[in-house]
Amino acid sequence: MKEPSPLRYFGVTPDSREEQILRLLIHAVVEGVGGDEGSLLVLDPSGDLRFAMTAGDSASEQALIGQRVPIGQGITGLAAQTRDVQIGAPTFRDVRQTEGKSEGPEAVLAAPMLIDDRLVGVVTAVSFTEGKRFDAHSAMLAGRLASVAAVVVEQTMQTAAMGAGRSQALEVHQLVDRIAEGAPEQLVQVASILSSFGAALGLRTR
Amino acid sequence: MRENSPLVAALATPLDDWWSRDLAPVEVAVIDSGVDASHPDIRGRVAAAYAVVMEDGRPVLQEAPADANNDAFGHGTGVAGLIAQIAPNARLVDIRVLGADNRGSGAGAIRGIEEAVHRRSRVVNLSLALNKSYNEQVRPICEVAWRQEQVFVAAKRNVPIEQVGIGTPAEFASSISVDMRKVDALKSVVYQPGRIIAFAARGEHAAVPAPGGGYTSSVGSSFATPVVSAICAVMLGAFPGLLPFEVRSVLRHHVSGVV
């Protein structure tokens, strides 16, 4: 069974406009910094990062979606922990960097997605091209685009919250309608209860 | 101003000449992800090591071996390596606050800062920034440090929206705050007049020590900050007795450029 996208935590549904915009942003990060692949990870309710979408290799997306990345792990975890853009490069045995030591991609970049200072996710880019290094310009660009991605997430969450509020108000309205039809004599009491509840919340009634 | 005061001497001596003076040892606390003290470039330079761990939701400071790998991410080893490379007189104190357990990391970082203040480390390098919700907790600690003549050198955050906060304690007047710039010379500082983040230094380094004995490249204000910390350590070693505001004035006097 296909793993549901962790983007659902933010109310971003598959194939929605917001999902497409986030995907565009990941592609923009990868292209802008000259990377080969990229990804967007979101912070799930348990406090771990989870892969939500990738750019570059469709097989990677199938393999990675939903996978957890503990916050304290690797460059991505460091970006999440410091709320700061982080850049990783391979390790060499010697200072002249002729003899490689580490495995994995040549260069990694991770930019936190922040709403105010609350972490909602991390955008990453990786390069497998030998000798490729991400620089200060890459960090700045990825940081900016991750900020835009965070705004998309924030707007989606706010829209979802407003929608939930509207549907609850509609439920109350429909309930009052049913009382008016079935037991109109109770309406005065209902109005009194709602008025008292409003007063308890500090709301003024007309 | 007395002619033989350290301030007069520091202002009169070109920055490059500081290294040829008899440098007194200066303790530099590195509050970061830990340091690999066994790395060949750092071996023998770490005087003490600590790790802040969370126990029952509270940050607890534990001693760590001062000759082993105490780095959880590789970040602190690069930072310490730059300080060790630039400041031959720096005695490093490794205070690990970034680790595998993110929860309570703000509280952990504050505990680390408190320890550096308790130790009276002359220079405190913070290549990390707390978010602004910690401002009121950290500000008085930094004020105490300022009064007991400690020099806090703190990184600006690499985030594009400054409303998020440019970084605590970098935005405090009691800190020397550092951004990164394209600068060729390693031992140089750039002045950014009119900005809260007053100084900048080289933030791109082709080879810094990595945990486990090796080298990697590094980018960010995190790696510009130790350049300034190291220069401050050399300054204080060459001209002991400088007060924190004098350190800032001397840095300003000897900048290689204004942007």
Image: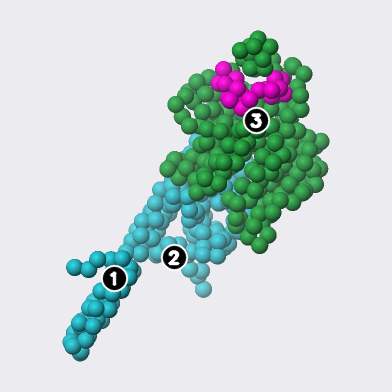
Numbered badge on residue B149: 3
Q: Residues within 10 Å of mark 1 (few under 14, many from 20)?
A: few
The span from disc 3 to disc 2 (Cα, nearest Å) is: 51 Å
Picture layout, residue A122 above or below residue B121: below
Picture layout, residue A147 above or below residue B21: below
| Chain B shade | green
Q: Nearer the viewer, mark 3 or mark 2?
A: 3
- Counting from the top left corner in percent of width and height, residue A2 is at 50, 70
Q: Is residue A194 left or right of residue B200?
A: left
Q: In cyan, which chain?
A: A
How many numbered tags mark residues here? Answer: 3
Q: Secondary structure at mark 1?
A: helix
Which residue corresponds to mark 2? A8
Q: Chain of mark 3?
A: B
Which residue appears at 31% of the width and 66% of the height? A202
Which residue appears at 60% of the width and 55% of the height? B104
Displayed quadrant of residue A95 = top right
